[in-house]
Image (cartoon, helix red, strand yellow):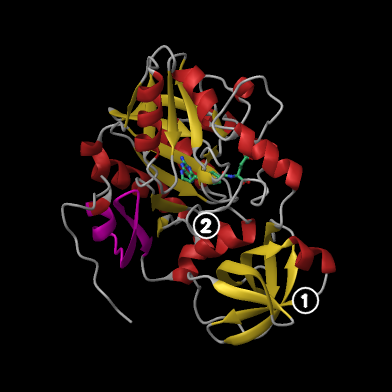
Amino acid sequence: MAIQLSIGARVRKSPFFEATLADGMVAASVYNHMYMPTSYGDPVSEYNRVINGVAMWDVGVQRQVAIKGPDALKFARYLTPRNLDVLEVGKGRYVPICNFEGILINDPVLLQISDTEVWLSIADSDVALWAGGIAGALGLKVKVFEPDVSPLAIQGPKAVDVAAKLFGDWVRDLGYFGFVETKLKGIPLLVAKSGWSKQGGYELYLKDKKYGSTLWQLVREAGEEFEIGPGAPNYVERVESGLISYGADTDDAINPFELGMDKFIDLDQEYDFIGKKSLIEIRRRGIKRRFMGLIIEGPSFPRTNESPWAVNKKGVDVGYASAAAWSPRVRSNIAVAMISIDAIESKETVEVTTDWGPREAKVVSLPII
Ligand code: THG
């Protein structure tokens, strides 16, 4: 099935849009009301670059929600169950956001920009509306808005060499999620050691959209000797690494404990936060399902699968696999899946209803690699 994507004013374009088109983008999805490139037509090379070389991704869809004003840090503490005692200017943190029922509604990276400003680098849901509404209702002294900021990711083992060539050797010493505000040939940006892969890399947060094509070109030129090429947040690598894709792996009843986010939740902290009462109750009752990996038998899947597949054990429904693919490194089909605790504890195999018929699978913990 080949369909066209209607390009129009209602869905926004990333500042890198023109550059990605010129570089051969052939497929896109929509994320935070913006087109997100998902393929340049060569999935094998795109995977190999992330695993063995370096890839560049237009992730301008990772929108920033800025919270600015005297109450910024106090409000950030109220928005997330994570204990923010660990915050520092120049450090990012992974901070789940729940609603009052304790259901996960986003899983951003929080960047502390200054003593009075934080950014939430969000996944695909409308955090600016949520946070702006709550701040207004509470009468907090903050402005909540989306700044002109768009990340470009470079990911893979050689990303560090590309970043060092662009910015200098100091980038090699950045700690994970550490970031620095700087300029590249006059282009204002923020360089962070982060990214949605476990292969290492950097995210360049462009702070002025008019430089989108210029920045793309500068990265491409610096990466040439390392055989950089365009790609997109890699589907296969993320399943191998067990990275959560909010909206794909999650449903409207999911809580952070089911996703294995326990270490990012502090129910015993002195501060109140949205969802605290509900999460305490959820923890008391215990969870009934958990985010796991699957090793699936049989010949390699001809393509990745992006619509959930039902999982059963002896005909009884035990969950769903939200993303599945052939993994060249595991040399097997694999998936991430929500699986009932009963099925996990039984240690027996399950059956996945794939597009290519039922397949037996073993349940394993994440990450798979
Ligand atoms: N980078 C930036 N913004 C983002 C993402 C990103 N916004 C959307 C989305 N990705 C948010 N979700 C995630 C999910 C996982 C991680 C980061 C953002 C991640 N997780 C590591 C892990 O799970 O192993 C590390 C978590 C930790 O130990 O703190 O990196 O990618 N700018």
Residue 251 tag number: 2
Start and end of the magenta stretch? 18-39
* Real-space CA distance between mark 1 and mark 2, rounded to the nearest whole angstrom: 24 Å
**Residue 330 in sight in this render:** no
Q: Quadrant of the N terminus?
A: bottom left
For the image, the number of numbered tags is 2
Location of residue 137 in the rendering, given as x and y in whole percent from the top left corner: 37, 24
Residue at left offset 45%, top offset 70%? 43
- Relative to 85, say whether 308 is above or below: below
Picture coordinates of residue 348 (x, y %)?
A: 81, 74
Q: Label 2 crowding class (10 Å Cα cut-off): few <14, some 14-19, many 20+?
A: few
Query: Dot 1 lies on which element?
Result: loop
Q: Is residue 198 magenta?
A: no
- Answer left or right for 262 relative to 29: right
Residue in the image at 59% along x and 29% along y? 173
| Residue located farthest toward the left when viewing the structure as drawn | 9
- Could you tell me which quadrant the C terminus lies in? bottom right
Taking the spot 62% from the left edge, 38% from the top edge, the residue there is 278
Q: Where 272 sits versus 56, above or below?
A: above
The amino acid on which the numbered mark 1 sits, given as a three-letter code, is Thr
Horizontal side of 66 relative to 34 (left or right) equals right
**Residue highlighted by disc 1:** 349
State which quadrant residue 268 falls in.
Answer: top right
Q: Upstream in the sequence, badge 1 or badge 2?
A: 2
Residue density around tag 1, few if under 14, some if 14–19, many if 20 or more, within 10 Å: some
> Ligand 1 is located in which of the four quadrants?
top right
**Tag 2: residue type?**
Asp
Where is residue 201? Give x, y as percent.
Answer: 53, 44
On the image, which quarter does residue 189 sit in?
Answer: top left
Residue 192: numbered disc: none
User: Residue placed at 39% from the left, 36% from the top?
Assistant: 130
The reply to whether residue 4 is visible in this rendering is: yes
